Image (cartoon, rainbow, N blue to C red):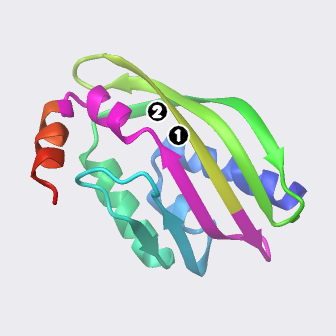
Amino acid sequence: MSGVVDLLARYRAAMLAMDADAFAELYAENGVHEFPFLFPGMPERYVGREEIRAGYRAVWGASAARPEEVREVAVHAAADPEVLTVEQVVVGTVAGTGRPFALPGVLVLRARGGLLVHVRDYMDGLGVARAMGRLSTVAARLEEAP
């Protein structure tokens, strides 16, 4: 489990720095990052290190949200030593407005050979939209969805 915990620390550091290159390098070449709680404007998943890099570079580059801290709620070891489940809250501010945000989420990390092979990212997508002042846009898109 210590290898996965080390990856978690590096994952959080890259996220706080909004460093898509450092973030992507944590993943195996064919690693997967999934977003099970879909909402308009987010992909269902990124497949492969380069797609993860490009996806996060685009998302972080377009975002005014500036994460400042990750508050760990709990870390749960699994029977499988490759898996770690993390409850956390990402806190920060929105550039330009100074509006604070606190976004709860759960990560399920699977690591092998010192790299992430699969991450399930259960983030609060509506909280993200709210923090960004885009909740009405997301709600309108949800109304349009089949």
**Residue 98's x, y, as percent?**
30, 16
Q: Residue at x 18, y 34 (%)?
A: 134
* Callout 2: SS: strand
Q: Picture quarter containing residue 65? A: top left
The type of residue carrying mark 2 is Pro
The answer to whether the residue labelled 1 contacts the one labelled 2, judged by CB atoms less than 8 Å apart, is yes
**Where, quadrant-wise, is the N terminus in this rendering?**
bottom right
Nearer to us in this view, 84 or 96: 84
The answer to which image quadrant residue 86 occupies is top right
Q: Quadrant of residue 89?
A: top right
Magenta-highlighted residues: 110-135
Specify whether 12 is left or right of 1: left
Residue depicted at 78% across the width and 40% down the height: 75
Label 2 neighbour load within 10 Å: few <14, some 14-19, many 20+ = some
The question of residue 72 being in magenta is answered with: no
Going by the image, does 67 lie left or right of 89? left
Residue depicted at 14% across the width and 32% down the height: 136
Say if 134 sits above or below 146 in the image. Answer: above
Q: Secondary structure at mark 1?
A: helix
Q: Nearer the viewer, residue 7 or 73?
A: 73
Residue at 42 percent across and 51 percent down: it is 37
Query: What quarter of the picture does the C terminus occupy?
Result: bottom left
Q: In the rendering, at what x and y percent does residue 25 appear?
A: 58, 69
Q: Which residue is mark 1?
A: 16
Q: Is 145 above or below relative to 24? A: above
Q: Residue furthest bottom?
A: 30
- The disc at residue 2 is none
Q: Which residue is mark 2?
A: 67
